[in-house]
Image (cartoon, rainbow, N blue to C red):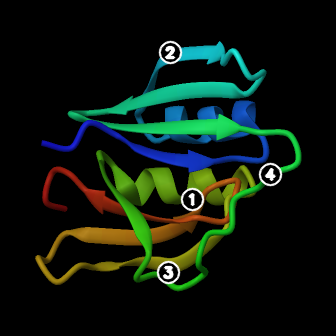
Amino acid sequence: MLKHVSFLTRDLAATLAFYVRLGGTVEKQLTTPEGYGRAVVCLGEGRLQFFEVTGEGPAPHPHWAEHIALHVVGLSDLLPMLRAQGVTVTRDLQPSPSGRDMAFVLDPDGRQVELLEASGG
């Protein structure tokens, strides 16, 4: 059973704010004994952990095949709001293979994030 997936981030506060806008909750935020910023975001049953390490940065792949996928409610309303807040949309609203609305956006570190309508449309 998967516990969490962990990523580097350039800006922990911006990354947390992004995932909270998508329905996540910050489960913990602290400074590690090494002085790194660390936080865990709960997204339903899943968790993403982020580390902000001085001198280190993420290197996400730009292709959509490498992505984080999240169920969201009200994607058709959420997507324009994200766009207005400066979030980059890399794949506009369209039907997914299952027929639900989906879109892809970039998180603050440039990671592809698939947003899939939770309610079926």
Report x, y in % for residue 2: 21, 44
Locate the N terminus by quadrant: top left
User: Which secondary structure, mark 4?
Assistant: loop
Q: CA distance from mark 2 to mark 1?
A: 29 Å
Q: Which quadrant of the figure has residue 121?
A: bottom left
Q: Residue at x 74, y 23 (%)?
A: 34
Q: Say which label, 4 or 1, has the lower sequence index.
A: 4
Question: Label 4: which residue?
Answer: 56
Q: Nearer the viewer, mark 4 or mark 1?
A: 4
Question: Label 2: which residue?
Answer: 28
Task: Give the side of residue 111 with respect to residue 47, left or right.
Answer: right
Q: Mark 1: which amino acid? A: Pro
Query: For mark 1, does the 10 Å Cα neighbourhood hold few (<14), some (14 to 19), or many (20 or more) residues?
Result: some
Q: CA distance from mark 2 to mark 3?
A: 31 Å
Q: Mark 4: which amino acid? A: Glu
- The front one of 40 and 32 is 32
Label at residue 91: 3
Q: Which quadrant of the figure has residue 24?
A: top left
Label at residue 80: 1
